[in-house]
Amino acid sequence: MSVFGVDIGGSGIKGAPVDLGRGELAEERFKVLTPHPATPDAVAECVKQVVDHFGWTGPVGATFPGVVTHGMTRTAANVDKGWIDMDAAGLLSQKVGCAVTLLNDADAAGMAEMEYGAGRGRKGTVIVLTLGTGIGSAVFVDGSLLPNTELGHLELHGHDAEKKASTKAKDDEGLTWEHWAKRLDKYLAHVEMLFSPELFILGGGVSRKADKFLPLLTGIRAEIVPAALQNNAGIVGAGMAAAAVRS
């Protein structure tokens, strides 16, 4: 079954048809830059552009970088505050011209990794972290998702954790892999202290360069692996969500 997934991020909006039989993109993804300011109308227009690029008319799933409950966006850390407490699924559905299923971006990536990727078949507590403009999180216990955990906003040494340990923080501050890995290490240790996971899966675009930083992480008891689906996990998870609603 093919569905369509769109991943709305703080820096880019990307999407593609998804082959759920294989857990892969059915076509090469299409990406546009996230508008600034990332207002609801501006982002919705970009989502339409991504969907229209493929001439898609079927089911669409979309991710959002914040808390999503029943199609309503409740937070907006890395996009315009106009998203807070709005019917985002309704707006996107109206703009795209078909029903859009909306969910948290890290939850979508986590769902894909648990079904097709590095978390497949894993029991116990698994935490998927997406490292990018911020830090997204998805927590699974024996394969079941606890939605909207937003662990990137844990306070660490007086700061919002994602402001110091995200990929954006690394790039903005010109940090070396070694310096950034030390920050990431402290963050992972804090999360591990709170949740005691058996496995961390690290995703986002930086997962393509896992060999640069994973060997530098120390003192974490849990197993740490890169996301198998890398930066396509959110698109695949969005497609999974759209299919689940229609099954």
Image (tube, grey):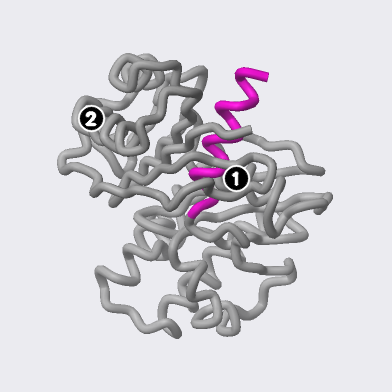
Q: Which residues are magenta?
A: 232-247
Q: Nearer the viewer, residue 239 or 136?
A: 239
Q: Identify the residue under disc 1.
A: 138
Residue type marked 2: Glu
Q: At 32% across and 14% down in the image, what residue appears?
A: 94
Query: Quadrant of residue 129 in the image?
Result: bottom right
Residue type marked 1: Ala
The span from disc 1 to disc 2 (Cα, nearest Å) is: 27 Å
Q: Which residue is situated farthest in the front direction here?
A: 55
Residue 34, image x and y in percent?
A: 24, 45
Whether residue 150 is situated above or below residue 121 in the rendered picture: above
Q: Which residue is situated farthest in the left direction here?
A: 37
Q: Nearer the viewer, mark 1 or mark 2?
A: 2
Q: Secondary structure at mark 2?
A: helix
Q: Identify the residue under disc 2.
A: 45
Q: At 68% across and 19% down in the image, what residue appears?
A: 247
Q: Nearer the viewer, residue 92 or 185?
A: 92
Mark 1 nearby-residue class (10 Å; few <14, some 14–19, many ≥20): many
Residue 211, image x and y in percent?
A: 55, 81
**Main SS class of the magenta portion in the image:** helix
Q: Nearer the viewer, residue 221 or 190?
A: 221
Q: Is residue 220 left or right of residue 7?
A: right
- Taking the magenta stretch, the answer to whether it contains residue 91 is no
